[in-house]
């Protein structure tokens, strides 16, 4: 005998924010799913991380309520129970779900995590993969459990990291893979053809929450690591240094490895070469193509230096 769930559309409650959440939501199969509501983060809080706080770009003709929250209140929890979802889908939501939310949907809560779990659990798997210099990462669709990113794996696909990718580009690529495979994964949950593969928790690694000062350049570090951070923190917080007691944001740069770099200090501005500002690092030179001084607009290196002759031979810190 066919279950009541399979006789009608699956009731889906979606939780997500920003471009990644939008990408996933707009791939949902509305012929199979009944979207009963969307929960997203409120825009009342000002944030410089667009992937966490941007409005969802929803492409749907269906009429459903959108709930904008900063936290789960008793009123919101009651509303979720009343909606009676079959499944909750979470994609780039930015809020931690209380344990009791996991008990509301009859078929569980499904989360998209942009790493090859159990590697890179936690809040910053995309930027961490870039900073660690990983050649490959991936995306996992899991059933959520109480422990962070520790649930059974329902779908997983490996992905080669293009050396030119920044965090936004890598994130879009990974969430696109997940979005293209989410419908089939959920359908398999409904017909019980998959239950998930348990993670090997002994292999788990963890990422940390990215803070604003993580973007501050340490000029005694490897130039390669500085460039990785430039790519990893492209969305937020950006990579920056200080000059003349002002924040100087590096927008575009490349690294030239060179062991014997003379007697210059790390962080010293060597000169303007081939339309790039050259800065000494631990093991070579960073060539800055574009940058932005606090309170000013983004400028190419040549224009920046021509307006500031004292910049050459000064030190960044």
Image (tube, grey):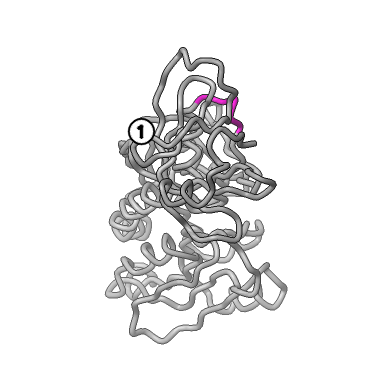
For the question of whether residue 158 can be seen, the reply is no
> Which quarter of the rendering shows the N terminus?
bottom left
The secondary structure that most of the magenta stretch takes on is loop
Horizontally, residue 89 falls left or right of residue 27, namely right
Residue 55 x/y as whole percent: 49, 72
46 lies above or below 116: below
Residue placed most toward the observer, 176 or 286: 286
Q: Please give the name of the residue rendered at 54% of the width and 72% of the height, measured from the top-left corner.
A: 39
Q: Is residue 235 above or below residue 151?
A: below
| Residue at x-position 54% and y-position 48% | 308
Q: Position of residue 166 (x, y in %)?
A: 40, 45
Toward the viewer: 19 or 107? 19
Q: Please, is residue 296 above or below residue 241 in the view?
A: below
Q: Measured along the vertical axis of the image, is residue 2 above or below residue 285?
A: below
How many numbered markers are drawn?
A: 1
Q: Quadrant of the C terminus?
A: top right
- The x and y percentages for residue 252 are 42, 45
To which residue does mark 1 refer? 136
**In the image, is 69 to the left or to the right of 195?**
right
Tell me which corner region of the image, top left, top right, bottom left or bottom right, holds residue 172.
Answer: bottom left
**Residue farthest right in this picture:** 74
Residue 70 seen in the figure? yes
Extreme residue in the bottom direction: 63
Magenta range: 218-222
Image quadrant where residue 34 sits: bottom left
Query: Badge 1: how crowded within 10 Å, few (<14), some, or many (20+)?
Result: some
Please say whether residue 221 is one of the residues in the magenta stretch: yes
Instruction: Give residue 72's position: percent from left, percent from top.
Output: 67, 68
């Amino acid at each position: 005998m066919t279950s009541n769930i399979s006789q009608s559309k699956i009731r889906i409650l979606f939780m997500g924010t920003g471009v990644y959440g939008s990408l996933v939501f707009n791939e949902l199969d509305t012929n199979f799913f009944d979207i009963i509501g969307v929960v997203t983060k409120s825009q009342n809080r000002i944030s410089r991380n667009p992937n966490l706080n941007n409005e969802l770009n929803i492409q749907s003709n269906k009429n459903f309520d959108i709930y904008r929250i900063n936290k789960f209140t008793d009123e919101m929890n009651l509303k979720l129970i009343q909606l009676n979802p079959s499944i909750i889908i979470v994609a780039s939501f930015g809020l931690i779900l209380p344990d009791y939310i996991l008990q509301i949907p009859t078929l569980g809560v499904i989360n998209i995590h942009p790493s090859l779990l159990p590697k890179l659990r936690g809040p910053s798997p995309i930027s961490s993969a870039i900073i660690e210099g990983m050649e490959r990462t991936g995306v996992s669709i899991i059933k959520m459990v109480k422990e962070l990113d520790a649930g059974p794996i329902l779908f997983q696909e490996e992905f080669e990291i293009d050396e030119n990718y920044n965090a936004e580009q890598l994130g879009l690529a990974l969430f696109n893979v997940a979005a293209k495979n989410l419908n089939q994964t959920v359908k398999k949950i409904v017909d019980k053809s998959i239950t998930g593969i348990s993670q090997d928790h002994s292999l788990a690694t963890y990422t940390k929450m990215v803070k604003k000062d993580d973007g501050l350049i340490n000029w005694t570090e490897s130039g390669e690591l500085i460039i990785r951070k430039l790519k990893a923190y492209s969305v937020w917080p950006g990579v920056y240094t200080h000059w003349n007691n002002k924040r100087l944001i590096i927008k575009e740069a490349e690294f030239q490895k060179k062991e014997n770099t003379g007697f210059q200090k790390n962080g010293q501005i060597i000169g303007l070469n081939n339309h790039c500002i050259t800065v000494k690092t631990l093991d070579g030179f960073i060539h800055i193509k574009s940058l932005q001084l606090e309170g000013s607009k983004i400028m190419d290196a040549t224009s920046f230096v021509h307006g500031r002759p004292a910049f050459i031979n000064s030190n960044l810190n």
